[in-house]
Image: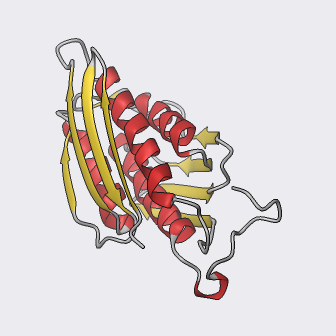
Amino acid sequence: MSRIGRVERTTKETSVLVEIDLDGTGRTDISTGVGFYDHMLDQLGRHGLFDLTVKTDGDLHIDTHHTIEDTALALGAAFRQALGDKVGIYRFGNCTVPLDESLAQVTVDLSGRPYLVHTEPEGIAPMIGSYDTTMTRHILESFVAQAQIALHVHVPYGRNAHHIVECQFKALARALRYASERDPRAAGILPSTKGAL
């Protein structure tokens, strides 16, 4: 059974299309108009082995906020849709990724209960190109709210803003991949004592 999510989201500020295949090979087609954000979403697809298409047309003449936020909301909704009933998945995933001097630790529970814990070093440079680095947390908040997952992201150290953000996306990709993969020992089983996720 295919595990594909497709979400179209249109407001007065943005028009977003996201399609994700959880059982893909890491093929991506990303275009948001925010170069660094495109790079991060590409990391998410490639390292998660998700086939990921993202097409966003936003009000970049104002700033990048709406484009980044609305894309993250649509991505979370598409990921949740692709998960389906969650029967037979691992549910939990974690990954630690270094990127030169930076390190990110990500743990995820595909719980059905949105919750985010996010820490990163203070004093991170405010901008990477047109990408406002304070948006990283907001991306994760928006994604978590729509995907309905519990997500803990911790960057204990790092100096370079590009590295600090990128290692988070790479670790997130791997943690989501591990959590959403099918467990061959649990075919037909929902990984919950409650009987619902």
Q: Where's the C terminus, which quadrant?
A: bottom right
The relative height of residue 142 versus residue 150 in the rendered view (above or below) is above
Q: Residue at x 45, y 43 (%)?
A: 77
Pinpoint residue 54: horizontal percent, then vertical percent: 25, 45
Residue 51 lies, in percent from the top left, at 28, 63
Residue 132 seen in this snapshot: no
Which residue is located at x 54 percent, y 32 percent?
122
* Above or below, 166 relative to 7: below
Give how far across and how far down residue 149 sits, in percent: 61, 48
Q: Is residue 151 left or right of residue 21?
A: right
Q: Which residue corresponds to the image point at 62% horizontal and 58% vertical from the top-left?
A: 107
Q: Quadrant of the N terminus?
A: bottom left
Q: Residue furthest bottom?
A: 185
Q: Residue furthest right?
A: 193
Looking at the image, which is closer to me, 105 or 98?
Answer: 105
On the image, the x and y values in percent for residue 167 come to 42, 55
Kindly indicate the quadrant of the structure image that contains residue 109: bottom right
The vertical placement of 159 against 97, above or below, is above
Total marks placed: 0
Examine the image and state in which quarter residue 12 appears. top left
Q: Between 93 and 161, which is closer to the camera in this rendering?
A: 93
User: Can residue 184 be spotted in the picture?
Assistant: yes
Compared across the picture, whether 46 is left or right of 174 comes to left
* Residue 29 located left or right of residue 37: left
Q: Relative to residue 7, is residue 64 depicted above or below?
A: above
Q: Nearer the viewer, residue 125 or 6?
A: 6
